[in-house]
Image (cartoon, coloured by chain):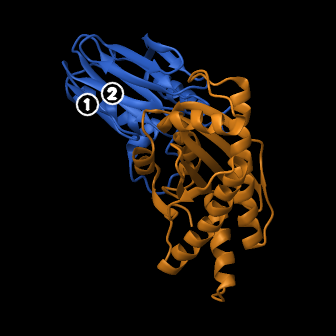
Amino acid sequence: MKHSVGIGEYRVVRPPAVLVSLGLGSCVGVALYDPERKIGGLAHVMLPSSNGTEKITNPGKYADQAIKLMLEEMIKRGASKSRIVAKIAGGATMFKNSKNSIGERNVESVREILKKEGIKIVGEDTGKNYGRSVEFDTETGLLHVRSFKYGETVL
Amino acid sequence: MVGQVMLNELEKDMLREVGSIGASHATNSLAELTNTKVDIEVPALEIKPVEELLASEGGEDLVAGVYVELQGDICGVIMLLLDIASVVELVTQITGMPSASEELSDMEVSVLQEVGNIMASHFSNALADFLGLKIMPAPPALAVDMGVAILDFIMLEQAQKANEVILFKTKFMFQQKQITGKIFLMPDPESLDRIIALLREKVGMGA
């Protein structure tokens, strides 16, 4: 069963569910997984941080909020933080001549937040200049990354 | 006003008018370039959270996007979006040579960038004339990829500044040819305020 995780959303599930996020450009897909309990979550984050935001209407779009909330929900469902690992994809810069660096900043922020939380990144396909779609299989913990440029890679 | 775009109906009408002037100049330039009639739909003004706009305007299909940054008195982005079938038709129409494959050649890339450049310049010139401002389009850049990935690039920077963003959207289509495309204008929140203030002056409402 495939569940779509839209822009600015996050979702926590158990197998046999597969979580899908389509068309990550500057956005970053953050997959968290407890391999022993097979509890997995995927967030489709848009922005590096909610710092300085007066009114947070949709916490899922910020890297800091989405990761925090997803971890809480996974732990509530029985995952252990010490076992949770992360795989991340996206954060591209789609146009070469731009000063816009939101993709890079998204990836940096996700790495920093995971480090602070003590969660190891065990797979990463980020940056460059192309869009990616991801499928996170909570049975295997594998993150399938598809792009027009390179086809499919598995993290 | 950051966070939410609050506009009354009159302001929205005025903005649609501005968008319409820009879009018709842009498509006229395309019509001249290709020597074909190009129709446009009535321009739409969308004011929504970025995640909603991306969900409705994006998609996973392969599209070409020409991105032009606006600088000067008004900052923002103009983007031309074409599906791949339209890209192939358009390049053939302009160069007289049929495209060999979906993989674009260097020549085809420059043709597309030039099309985007011409359309964006006409769009921003019309805007600048109407508002009495100086707007300078930066050199164009091209990406061929999933629609939503291309659009999130232009929208996320805005999403940092405001919960809701404003998008001027115009669809155009060639008569008798299978070419359809969209042209987007997205002003920065501060520039939008400036445009609205100028429009108010124009209709004698003061700022």
Identify the hue of chain A. blue
Q: Secondary structure at mark 2?
A: strand
Q: Is residue B107 left or right of residue A152?
A: right
Image marks 2 and 1: residues in contact by CB distance under 8 Å: yes
Same chain letter for marks 2 and 1: yes
For residue A99, say whether it is visible: no
- Label 2 to label 1, Cα distance in Å? 6 Å
Other residues around mark 1 within 10 Å, as few (<14) / some (14–19) / many (≥20):
some
Q: Is residue A65 left or right of residue B86?
A: left
Chain for disc number 2: A
Comparing B1 with A49, the one in front is B1
Disc marking residue A3: 1
Q: Quadrant of the N terminus of chain A?
A: top left
Q: Is residue B18 above or below residue A56?
A: below
Residue B98, image x, y percentages: 63, 28
The chain shown in orange is which? B
The residue depicted at 50 percent of the width and 73 percent of the height is: B7
Mark 1: secondary structure: strand
Q: Amino acid at mark 1?
A: His
Q: Which residue is mark 2?
A: A20
- Look at the picture and state if B192 lies above or below A66: below
Q: Label 2 amino acid?
A: Val
Q: Position of residue B25 (x, y in %)?
A: 68, 62
Look at 72% across and 49% down and name the residue there. B33
